Structure formats: C-alpha cells, structure tokens
Amino acid sequence: MGRPPRHLPTNRPPEHAAPPAEEVLRALGSVLAPLVRLLLASGLDYARLVAELKMLFVEQARLELLRGGQPDTNSAISMLSGVHRKDVREWRENRLGARVAQGVSVSSQVYARWVQDPLYRDRRKRPKPLPRLGAVPSFDTLARSVTQDVHPYTVLTELIRLGLVNIEARKGEEFVVPNREGFVPPAGSRELFDLFAGNLSDHASAAVGNLLHGAPRLEQSVFVEGITRESAQHLGELARRLWSQARNEMIAEASRRYAADRNRGDATYRARFGAYYWEQDLQSRDSAGDSAQEREQDETD
C-alpha cells in the first residue's frame, strides 16, 4: 500500500491584493540607488551584494512562511525565495539565530536622562552645562543616577568620543557642555553605522507595512521643488530646530514610559521616532546625467 497523499494547507485568502511586482521594482530602483553608491564607495561590488542578498531572501522567506502559518521546511523556503535548497540548508545550519539584539549603551542612557530630568535642564527644558564634579546637579551625579557599575569618568570619555559633549573651563572649574545638535557620531564610526542600519531599517519597515496594508504607521514627509539654495539652507535650519524640539519631548516621554514598563512581563515592544532632511541641486543632477551619457557615447564610438 502506498503512502496516502499529503493534505494541502488550508490558508485563508489574503485580505488585500499584493502590490504589483513591476511597481515594486520601479520604486526599489529609487530606494536602492543611494545604497549602491555606498557599496561602490566602500569597495563592495555586485557579486558581494548578491551573496548577502541570497541569505536575506532565505531569512525573510522563512519569516513569511511562519507568519502565514506554514511549515518553514528547506523546500518551502527554497520555493518562495528562489534560493537553491543546498544554500538554504547551509544557512539554517550555520546562520540561523546568529543575529543578536543590541541593548542601549550606558552613554545613551545618561544622555537621555540629561534631556528629560528637570534637575539637569535649563529654563528652556534643554540639557544644561554641568560641573564635572560636585553635588547635584553635576555630571558625576547624573552618571551615577543611571548606573553604579560604570565610573562617571568612563561615561564622560565615551560621550566626548561620540561628539555629544565638550569640556570647558569656567572660573577654574571644568564644565561638561552638551552638544546642542544632539547625537552626531563621527563619520565612519561603529555608532554611525548602527544608526544608519537602525534608522533605515525601521523607516523601511514602516513604509513596507503601509504598502502591505498593515496597521497605518506614521511615514510622511514635506516636499518642495523650485526654490533657491538659500531657501533650501533656511529650510534645513528650520528642520533641525523642529527636530530638536520633537526629540527632547519624545526622549522625556519615552524615558517615563520605560521606567514604568520595564518590570512588566508584557514589555516586549520597541519603538523608534525619526526625521530626516535632504536637499539637492536638480540642475547639477541633470548635468551629471548628461555627462554620463556623453561618456557612454564616446566609449561606444
């Protein structure tokens, strides 16, 4: 007697139609263009990108199967992702569960406390310059209010390295002065790469969730075209001021929520709130495109 045929899965039909594939590819062309520029500037070519994309397709295909209540077998992952079964098997054996979530650094926690604690803010509710040592309010007491495990000097040197604070001498006393621009890590630093990955990943997750008819999430921008360089710079300064206000308010509320929720069993969520500003000279972009076409024609001739 032969083995009885397997029962087919009884999945419910999707509530919404999938986005048109061609429209998705067209949009991704614009999204990926600056990322390809980063790859080329870093010496990473197409072959290296494809090798990484292969594993990302496998990983996301597995998650998609699990979300749909289907078994995440090697065959199912291979069929959905288009990646060969032997590559899927290699990934499952060597890379499954290799991604480790990173916690918030002590320096970030100290800076967040500085922003939200009234003892360490000025009348405009901004983090104020603090004596390095001494009684409350000082940087020493600020750091110790966050952790007793890391010496305030260690926290201070890390904040200096990240460009979050400066040291100024005032009447023979050292003061720790916050950077009014906020957290701006040095170019090429590990912290900047972490911010790059976290910000773009969560922004993309919100946008993709909206495209796939998930619960609507904030993902908006203001766009204007046909202004001068001076106007663009003015809008950039306004954007930084607006972000500074929103950031301080969000940090204060997030800190209060974290303090109230951190010991609860259902405190399993994370959230990110961000903003960005970009300006571009359209004439320069068009000129660059013309030059590229001319060079291509020269090589063809």
Image: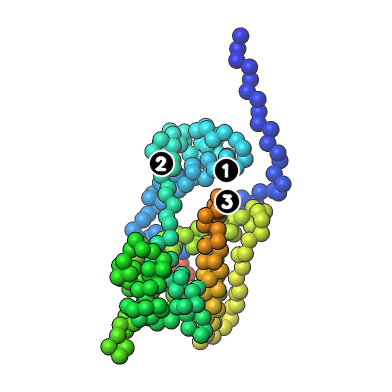
Mark 2 Cα shell of 10 Å, populated few (<14), some (14-19), many (≥20) = few
Mark 1 Cα shell of 10 Å, populated few (<14), some (14-19), many (≥20) = some
Which residue corresponds to mark 3? 266
Q: Quadrant of the N terminus?
A: top right
Which residue corresponds to mark 1? 64
Q: Is residue 179 visible?
A: no
| Lower position in the chain sequence, tag 3 or tag 2 | 2
Which type of secondary structure does the marked residue at label 2 adopt?
A: loop
Query: Which residue type carries mark 2?
Result: Arg
Q: Residue furthest top?
A: 1
Q: Is residue 139 above or below residue 168?
A: above
Query: Which residue type carries mark 3?
Result: Asp
| Lower position in the chain sequence, tag 1 or tag 3 | 1
Residue 53 location, x and y as percent? 45, 48
Which type of secondary structure does the marked residue at label 3 adopt?
A: loop
Which residue corresponds to mark 2? 95
Which residue occupies 51% across, 85% down? 123
Which residue occupies 41% across, 41% down? 95
Disc 2 from disc 1: Cα separation = 18 Å
Which residue occupies 38% across, 64% down? 147
Query: Which residue type carries mark 1?
Result: Glu
Q: Which is closer to the viewer, label 1 or label 3?
A: 3
Q: Residue furthest bottom?
A: 171
Along the viewing direction, whichever of 205 and 246 lies nearer the viewer? 246
